[in-house]
Amino acid sequence: MSVLMINPNRFRPHIAPIGIEYVCNSLLRENIEFDLIDLNFEPESVIYQKLHDNNVDLVGITVRNLDSGVLAKTVLFQPGIKKLVNRIKNTRDCKVVLGGVGFSIVPREILAYSGADFGVTGYGEEALPRLVRALRQGGDLSKIDNLIWRENDKFRVNAKSTGDYENIPTRRRDIVRSRSYYRVYGIGGIEPMRGCPETCGYCCEPKVAGSKIVTHKIANVIEELVQLKSMGIHHVFFCDSEINLCNREYLFDFCEQLDERQVGITWTASMYPDPKTVSHKLLTLMKKAGCREIFFGCDSGSDEILAGMGKRHTSEDSVIFAEYLRKAGIRPLPAYLIGWPGESVKTIGETFDHIKRCQAEAVVMEAGVRIYPDTKIARIAMEEGVINKDTNLMDPIFYNSEQVLREFLPYIRRRAKDMENSILYPTGAIDFINLLIRNFFLLDGYTARGIGDFVAHMNNLPQRKKLKMLGKTVLDLALPSRRRFVPLAKEDRS
C-alpha cells in the first residue's frame, strides 16, 4: 500500500509544516512507502499525476488551520480542502484521511463537509501507521486511538491518547524543504513538547494536544536541532505551548545539555507570564543555551478582562515577567487579544498603558476573539445567543465582531501611531506585510533572531534597500504569478 501525503496550506507567512513531517517520520519507521507533495513548491496538478501513475491507496492531508483567524481579513481554508478531496476521489478510487491541529478542533464537522473517509485528531504519529496496516490487513479500526471514521453513514470516534510520544526516536528533518522555508521566513520550527494545563477562555490547545504536557526526550530534541543547524537553519521557534509550564527539571536539563553540546542555534519560545514560574538562574541559563526572545500572552492590561479570560496572572505579573526577561538579556515579545466580553475603549487604553510599562521593542496585538468549541468564550456566546447548539464552528465566528471592527480597530490604529513600540496588529494589508517579510529575507540574506530582531534590523536598512524590497513586494501583490510558489534553496533541490 502506497501513501501520498499532502500539505495544501499556501497561506502566508511561509512556515514549514513540521506536523506532517513528524507523521511522515512514523511512516518511515514502519517502512511504509509514501510520497509528500507540498503545494507551496509544486502545482496541484502533480497530485493527480501521481495518483494516475502510482499505486496510491491512501491520501493524507494536513489541515493546520481552520481559516486565517484574522477578523479584519478572514480567509476560509475548508472549501479548498473539500475541493481537493473531491478531485482526489474523482481521479482515483482511494481513501482520504485528514489530520492536523485545525482538523482536530472540529473533526466531525470537517469530515462531514469535506467527504474524507478518516480523520486523526491530536497525536498522529501512531494512528496513521496503524490505519495503513489496518487497511492493508483488514484490521479493527475501532482499536486505533485518535481515529474518527465512518461506519454505516455514522461517525465513530475512538479513544484519545498521547501514545508513546515521549519515546519517539530522533525525527528526521529533511523530509520537507526546511531550508527553502527558512529562506523566506527566517525562522525554523521544532516541537520539544505538547499539551497545556491552562484553561484560557479562548484557547482550544488542551482539547487538541491534551491538558498534560508531554515532553520529547532531550537527547532527541538536541539531535534534531543539530540536523537543522547542518541544513543552514540558525534560528528556530519552539512550536509548542508555554515551556515554563512543563516539569522544571526538564527545562533546566534541556538548557544545560543544549549549552554543553554547543549546537550554535538560537531560539524563540512561548512562556506563561507568571514570574513565579521562572528565576534569574533559569532565564540566564536559557540565554546561555541560545534563547533570544520569549513570546508571552499578556492578553490584556485590564485585570478585569484577564479574570474573565480565566488567566492566573495579573497585569502586574506580566510587567514583572518582561523585566525578568530583559535583565537576563532575552527580548520580551508580549501579545494581546482585544475583544473579550466586557472590552471597551477604556480597557484597551489600559492595555496600551501596559504595553508602555512592558518596554518591548515589538508587540503583537490580535483584534477579535474567534469562538472555538468547548471553550469558555463558546459557553458565553451560547448564553448570550450569539451561537446555539447547532452552530457550526468550523466557520469563523468572532465574539462582538461589529464593535471590534467599527470601534476597537480604529482606536488601536490611532493609539499605535503614538507608540514608540512596533505594534503588529492584523489589518487588510496582512498579505502585503507577509510578502514584505518574504522579500526581506530573500533580498537581504539576513538571519533573524526573533521578530524583534527582524523589526530592528529592518528599521536600520539603507533607504535604497528598503525601496527595493518595497518595489518587489508591490509587484508580487499586483502579479500573483510571481508569488505562487516558495523559491527553492539550492540545499533543498532534489
Image: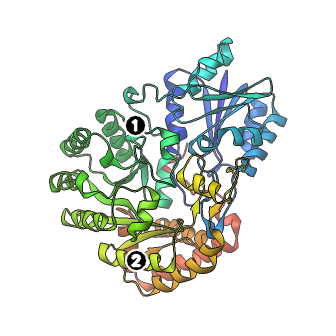
Mark in front: 1 vs 2 = 2
Residue indicated by mark 2: 350
Evaluate whether residue 448 shows in this view: yes
Q: Quadrant of residue 158?
A: top right
Residue under the point 38% across and 31% down = 170
Q: Position of residue 313 (x, y in %)?
A: 33, 59
Indicate the quadrant containing the N terminus: top left, top right, bottom left or bottom right.
top right
Q: Nearer the viewer, residue 20 or 108?
A: 108
Question: Where residue 462 sits: x, y (%)?
Answer: 40, 83
Q: Nearer the viewer, residue 102 or 469?
A: 102
Residue ID at (46%, 84%): 415
Secondary structure under tag 1 reads loop
Q: CA distance from mark 1 to mark 2?
A: 33 Å
Which image quadrant: the C terminus? Answer: top right
The figure's colour scheme reads rainbow
Camera-side residue of 352 and 331: 352
- Eyeballing the image, is 50 above or below 371? above
- In the rendered image, is residue 445 in sight? no
**Local crowd size for mark 1, using a 10 Å CA cut-off: few (<14), some (14–19), many (≥20):** some
Tell which circle, 1 or 2, labels the residue nearer the N-terminal end. Answer: 1
- Residue placed under numbered mark 1 in the picture: 212
Q: Up-down: is 397 above or below 479?
A: above
The answer to whether 353 appears left or right of 31 in the picture is left
Task: In the rendered view, tell whether residue 406 sits above or below residue 397.
Answer: below
Q: Is residue 318 left or right of residue 77?
A: left
